Amino acid sequence: MELRKHWPPPRWRGRFRRVRLFIVHSHFRPGGVRRVIELGVSHLVALREGDVAEVTLVGGERPDANWWNGFRQISAPASARCRIEPALGYLSEQRAKPSAIRSRVRRYLRRVLGQTPVRETAVWAHNLGLGRHPILAEELVGLCTDRGLRLVLHHHDWWFDNRWARWPEMRRAGLRSLRRVAQALIPVGGQVHHVAINRADAAVLRKHLGAHARWIPNPAETGGPPRLRPGRSARRWLRSHLGVEGPVWLMPCRLLRRKNVAEALLLMRWLRPEAWLVTTGGPSSAEETSYARQLAAAARRYAWPLRLSVLQRGGPDQPTVAALMQSSEVVLLTSLQEGFGLPYLEATTAQRPLIARRLPNVAPDLARLGFRFPQVYDEIWIDPQLFDWEAERSRRRAAYAAWRKTLPAFVRAQVGAARGHGEDIRPCPLAFSRLSLAAQIEVLRHPVAWSWQLCAPLNPFLRTWRRLAAARRLQPAGWPARAEARLGATAYARHLSQVLRTRERPAPDRRAAVRCLEDFLRLKLSAENLYPMLWNPRG
């Protein structure tokens, strides 16, 4: 959170003592960002008690009472406050004019940060690069730069990584050019520092921002979050609240298109037909509700063993995600994309087998840290007899054409040939991840025995996994000793605190932001990073 007495002194003379840490995010809903905030604060406070004076959450909506009460506990002995202004919420969820929103955001930030002692203040802002509130990004960067406050921008996700619905919102906010977008979301400044959670993103940032960028992978808890350790009643809770009697395979995630939930259901039905698939969170924004509704409707219609968003309602007796993991037979992570992928680590610490896609921007980092996951795969290949080939081909071609028109003019020409958007003339096996939601549901509608018979030869590794799953012998990953140096509580707190206490450095060239964004666009718009299901909010 805030800075410690044993840290090197900042650019001014004298020791940096008790710090006021302001954590900025548009919301504190369940999800990976909130989990990082929770773990990061607990680690920083535990590093050396007494150096963190205050922790203030600054956002657009108040967190649920259960989580907030727990957060106040793990923040001790520092005091914890919550400062909420609805104008800081997602821009797409507000009706006021951008000019009115900007005025409210500016006034509020000045009220919260305008009078804080510069030497005692650090701002830790999350996911501004997602583009959900570019006005907040511009105003926060401007205020921190004017006052000389240290600002750490923690990048979990990016607006240009299959989230192109953000572009109209940015235009509405007045960011209509590559330069304006780059300066707002990847700003440069002597006291502005960037943190990426995977090495691929960090490499691009470092290339242009130098020492102002750093790789800090997400933290892990090998023994459960401090003073928030999971209870033992999660399995009973599942039975009583859901009527689930069979084994549970868990997806610890929000209900988003990129989580690719249907693929997890397909794998579970093939490998462990008597199990139930359970997901934890609900959709996080209005544009994800159509996907959630279609999936839920299909599950009801075809009586799939699927329970969605079991932790969405909250409640005093509700178990934690960690408790659900420990009570589940298997954890799944079938996401199309992740910034880091906390379930890789959380399944390992819970000692539960993990079945996961090998994500190209995540797998190299985990391998570098020493992790070896026994059940990872690249794609699940589907026989074209299981869906209407011509209808799917037409859907993908139409979705691709419509999606391409929504792109900013300055990136449209950079879009790679989208693999699987309709260029194949004759039916051939396709990756399940490259199908539209409509085609995924078609595949799942078929009897399990029939789809397995057709697809098992295309995915020979699944035969071994099926035998192991039936015998309950799927293997969890081990926790490598060298991972502790990057992911352990003390290590994470040390790396994060080093960024928060970094002295002012000469600012990079202002053109560095634009060059950085241009490199990101080339990387993220390559064919392997394009998925039909992410082109259309309706799936």
Image: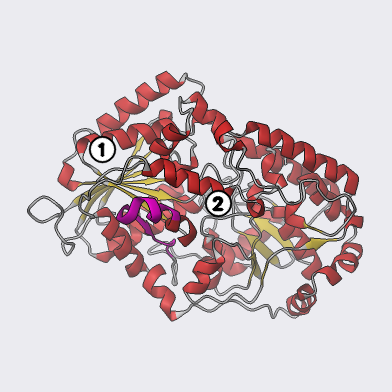
| Amino acid type shown at disc 2 | Leu
Q: Position of residue 528 (x, y in %)?
A: 66, 55
78 to the left or right of 217: left
259 to the left or right of 221: right
Q: Residues within 10 Å of mark 1 (few under 14, many from 20)?
A: some
Q: Position of residue 151 (x, y in %)?
A: 29, 45
Q: Is residue 23 visible?
A: yes
Element class at badge 2: helix
Q: Indicate the quadrant where residue 99 lies.
A: top left
Q: Residues within 10 Å of mark 2 (few under 14, many from 20)?
A: many
Locate the C terminus by quadrant. Answer: top right
For mark 2, what is the residue?
Answer: 523
Outermost residue, left side? 14
Q: Earlier in the sequence, mark 1 or mark 2?
A: 1
* Residue ID at (69%, 49%): 531
* Residue ID at (16%, 61%): 8
Q: Position of residue 455 (x, y in %)?
A: 85, 66
Element class at badge 1: helix
For mark 1, what is the residue?
Answer: 145
* Residue ID at (92%, 63%): 450
Start and end of the magenta stretch?
Answer: 204-219
Q: Position of residue 94 (x, y in %)?
A: 50, 26
